[in-house]
Amino acid sequence: ILAGKTALVTGSTSGIGLAIATAFAKAGANVVLNGFGEPAAIEATRAELAASTGVTVTHSGADMTKPDEIAAMVAEAEAAFGAVDVLVNNAGIQHVAPIDEFPIDKWNAILAINLSSAFHTMRAALPGMKRKGWGRVINTASAHALVASPYKAAYVAAKHGIAGLTKTAALEVATAGITVNAICPGYVWTPLVGKQIPDTMKARGMTEQEVKEKVLLAAQPTREFVKVDEVAALALFLCRAEAANITGALLPIDGGWTAQ
Ligand code: NAD
């Protein structure tokens, strides 16, 4: 599906982003990974993905809170591969606390990484897509782009923001051969979910098992975590020619959560 194309996936050293990058590499795209982690572990991931798929895989350590690093990351990808054909805005963090105790630096970081970084990447990458007359922007939003939960003020605000940004960008490039969509996963079993369990235990006074059953999977009628490979398959579908008329859409993949 993506032979000869280049995909840049932010926040792809782990979790959903790594699954999307892997699916795209298997579909023939050269891949620019991005995200934090142990340098040796990132290099091992990069080398393994390149070796198992035969595509070129690079890694950018650009910090999604820094607009100049984001612009440089896109420019480097375009210089190395000639284009960024597929852009996935996936980097994200979470913090769980009541609004009146919510640390200001966490609010600022979540808005920067989960929302503003997608503005900065699109601002840099859309001109190249317009020149080629083809492009795909896929934003990893969340069920929290559609509905709220308590104690996640910054995350819910950022994800609702990315829903609006997705729709606006889709309208702006609708006649340019570029689609812009948001995938809205429910709870997917990744490090991001694992790490918020202790804070949720504290905020709600619950045990770990209670958080999993009464907070996380309680929202999801299937009572199952979504799998990263299922999210990656949806992202890959959006790259197909048959998906050319899916744009400005917020696509839930949430086990029925937002149907309630
Ligand atoms: P994860 O923690 O496994 O991965 C997050 C990635 O973002 C990592 O690669 C990390 O290094 C990177 N990252 C964090 N801060 C960064 C920064 N400043 N600059 C560059 N990269 C940075 O989490 P995940 O669950 O795979 O989440 C990926 C996306 O999916 C996020 O946007 C998240 O909000 C969204 N999402 C996750 C779930 C879920 O249940 N896991 C549900 C809905 C939406």
Image (cartoon, helix red, strand yellow):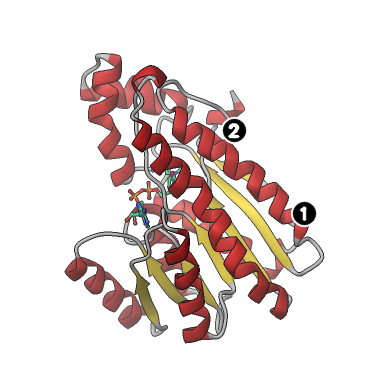
**Looking at the rendered structure, which numbered label has been put on residue 171?**
1
For label 1, count other residues whose C-alpha is less than 10 Å away and answer few (under 14), some (14-19) or many (20+): some
Q: Position of residue 14 (x, y in %)?
A: 32, 57
The percent position of residue 79, horizontal first and vertical second, equals 50, 85
Q: Are marks 1 and 2 in contact (CB under 8 Å)?
A: no
Q: Residue furthest top?
A: 205
Q: With respect to residue 76, does 39 lie above or below?
A: above
Above or below, 201 against 177 in this view is above
Q: Which residue is mark 2?
A: 146
- Mark 1 residue CB less than 8 A from any atom of ligand 1: no
* Residue 155 on image: x %, y %: 45, 35
Q: Amino acid at mark 2?
A: Leu
In depth, the one of 164 and 123 nearer the eye is 123
Residue projecting furthest to the right: 175
Q: Disc 1 or 2, which lies upstream in sequence? A: 2
Residue 51 appearing in the image: yes
The structure residue drawn at horizontal position 33% and vertical position 75%, both measured from the top left corner, is: 49
- State the residue at coordinates (30%, 74%): 46
Quarter holding residue 106? top left
In the picture provided, is 167 more to the left or to the right than 188? right
- For this rendering, which residue is in front, 51 or 134? 134
Q: Is residue 248 visible?
A: no
Taking the spot 58% from the left edge, 55% from the top edge, the residue there is 119
- Return the mark for residue 187: none
Residue 44 x %, y % = 22, 73
The C terminus - image quarter: top right
- Does the closest atom of ligand 1 sit within 8 Å of the Cβ of label 2? no
